[in-house]
Image: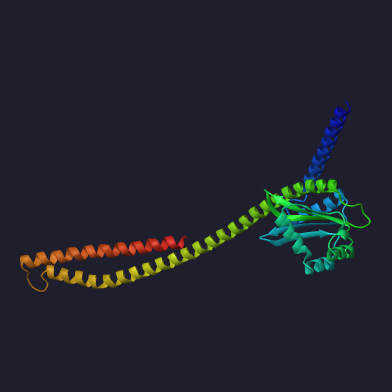
Amino acid sequence: MCIRDRAIRGQYSALKREHKRLKVLDEVNKELSQTGLSLEKTLNKFVELASYEAGLDKCEICLYSKGKDLLRITKGYTKKQLRQLEKLGVLEESKETILKTKKPVVVMNTQKTRPKYAKISKEHNVKSFINLPLKIDGKIVGHIHAARSFKQPTLTKKSLELLETLALGAAVAVKNSQLHERVKNFNVELEKEVKKATKELRELNAELIRLDEMKSEFVSSVSHELRTPLTSIKGYIALLLANEVGRLSEEQKEFLEIVNSESDRLIRLINDCLLYTSDAADELDGV
């Protein structure tokens, strides 16, 4: 009976913890969703929520891109302290450890670590800390740093569980923000490409209009130049056929009539060219 009671109490405690975890996750998702889809606003909100929910004196979330820091949001550390930590290589070492082990780093008492880090921790008032990998679709995209001061209780296993729950909410929010940024950037690039293509089409259209005008001018000029001698040729053929310069033989008349007919055909062709250039000019004026 006692064993059964203990089992029931254990199950109840587990269910209670899971309920609390889901409740926290739901609250985090709701809070983060209110920031819109701005990545920086989302991370700032997460740092505030994590600090409050886990009772943290210091909190940081950092995103990576190709092994380098993409965005770092910190609460509880001054800019001077961050510069010192970066200069000492602490920030880079923490990141490398996360990427290498892919597991949380939990330090319950910083004064029991290496002298170098014990001294740094004391200077920065860090009693205990947890560095937690931030994963999206199984891939590490950053980390969460949670720390308590010497005046606060030490971070525990329960703290780690709570932070892991918070990290799930952060991962969802970060993923949504990144997707939004990609869509936004895609739309911006698409707009640029459309403007570029439109500009190129306008330039090509202007060039086509210019070339068409040159062609029309050439055809018109050549047509007028041909028309003048053809008029003279037609006039002289008429004089010859009218026997104004002497009688012609039947064979001569036949040849002249052929020349006259071909001249008429050539004049019609010239007139068609002039008509085409005139119509083309009217169309261009309407563009």
- Looking at this view, name the residue that lies furthest to the right: 151
x then y, percent, for residue 157: 84, 47
Instruction: Say above or below: 214 vs 105.
Output: below
Residue that extends furthest to the top in the rendered view of this protein: 1
Which of the 4 quarters of the picture holds residue 120?
Answer: bottom right
Whether 166 is drawn above or below 277: the answer is: above
Measured as percent of width and height from the top left, residue 23 is found at 82, 40
Q: Nearer the viewer, residue 247 or 253?
A: 253
Residue at the limit of the structure toward the left, as seen here: 249
Taking the spot 75% from the left edge, 62% from the top edge, the residue there is: 93
Q: Nearer the viewer, residue 21 or 127?
A: 127
Residue 127 on image: x %, y %: 89, 57
Residue visible at 43% across and 65% down in the picture = 208
User: Foreground: 264 or 33?
Assistant: 33
| Image quadrant where one finds the N terminus | top right
Q: How many marks?
A: 0
| Residue 132, image x, y percentages | 77, 53
Location of residue 19 with respect to 54 vertically, above or below: above
Residue 13: quadrant of the picture: top right
